[in-house]
Amino acid sequence: MNPFHYYTPDTQDELLTLLQQYGDSAKLMAGGTALVIMMKQRLVVPEALISLHRLPGLAAVREADGSVHLGALLTHRGAELSPLLQARLPVLAETYRHVATVRIRNVATVGGSIAHADPNQDPPVTLLAFDARVQMTSTAGSREVPLVDFFTDYYETVLRPDELLTGLRVPIPAPHTGSVHLKFLPRTADDYATVGVAATVQIDPSTGTCQTCRIALGSVGSTPLRAQQAEALVQGQALSTALLREASAVAQQQTDPLNDTRGSASYKRAMAGVFVRRALEQAWQHAMGTVAGS
């Protein structure tokens, strides 16, 4: 690795002052599962490395104002095992349970995963389907951005060099809502997926029609993405084979995958259609037969 200054601030104010001082030349480290590898490969060459492990109050899970709040320093393992998350957003807890291996989940953080902006990761897909929002702060103040607007390109986000990602706010689903996260793994259980899809469907129980729909995909573009045209197609409709087929075809058109060892671009696009259809059908069935947040 290149030589760098290493800081371990005890407060957010101290950290934000360092970010203001170094700007683009600084990198924040929480779990470090991705950053350390990139530094070893010299893909990232920071002048300053700022550890977050001493910052207080950023690893909590709490419920407030109709949402579950996840602190940025909460580990994937902590999210997986959180009783609150299991009760209120079980599909999200399950998504974290299937990330890599338990050794990785013990150190990788919720905020680090989002800030890293790897389009192949699982949690951003489920978080998009739950309409999560990202909370950030700097010396100039705090702001909150919908996750759907947070990712801009490969490993790029709207997070400014002087900002700290402090947490996520995930709305608790309304009654008669069903959710699911599915992924296709061509090799091992701890590998990146060929395609990942999450869907959330809220129905009118008296008619069975869809009131709200969100469809998110991973590993099929430069960012995790929402298939918003497919969502619009589904809303107000009743479940049918024809609707599922049409929605999956529309979702496919919004993908832009790369050829790699997990499949060709055409194969990934085809699999995206298959998994959108499955995810929508399963979410719809959960909405018709289970309680909110299933």
Image (spheres, rainbow, N blue to C red):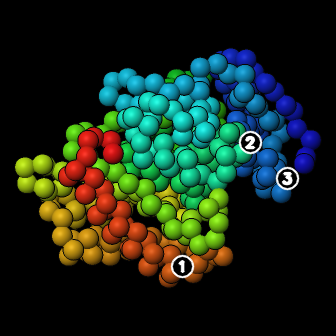
Q: Which residue is mark 2?
A: 32
Left of 34 or right of it: where is 276? left
Q: Which residue is mark 1?
A: 265
Label 3 Cα crowd, 10 Å radius (few <14 / some 14-19 / many 20+): few
* Residue type highlighted by circle 3: Lys
Above or below, comparing residue 139 to residue 173 in the picture: above
Label 1 Cα crowd, 10 Å radius (few <14 / some 14-19 / many 20+): some
* Residue type highlighted by circle 1: Ala
> In the structure shown, which secondary structural element does the residue marked by tag 2 occupy?
loop
Above or below, comparing residue 220 to residue 30 in the picture: below
Tell me the CA gap for discs 1 and 3.
29 Å
Residue at x 43% of width, y 56% of height: 181
Q: Nearer the viewer, residue 179 or 117?
A: 179
Mark 2 or 3, nearer chain start: 2
Q: Position of residue 12 (x, y in %)?
A: 65, 20
Residue 271 appears in view: yes
Q: Nearer the viewer, residue 268 or 86?
A: 86
Q: Position of residue 168 (x, y in %)?
A: 48, 35
Q: Which mark is residue 292?
A: none
Q: Are the residues flagged by discs 1 and 2 in contact, CB closer than 8 Å?
A: no
Select label 2 or label 3 by which is in front: 2
Residue at x 21% of width, y 45% of height: 176
Q: Are the residues flagged by discs 1 and 3 in contact, CB closer than 8 Å?
A: no
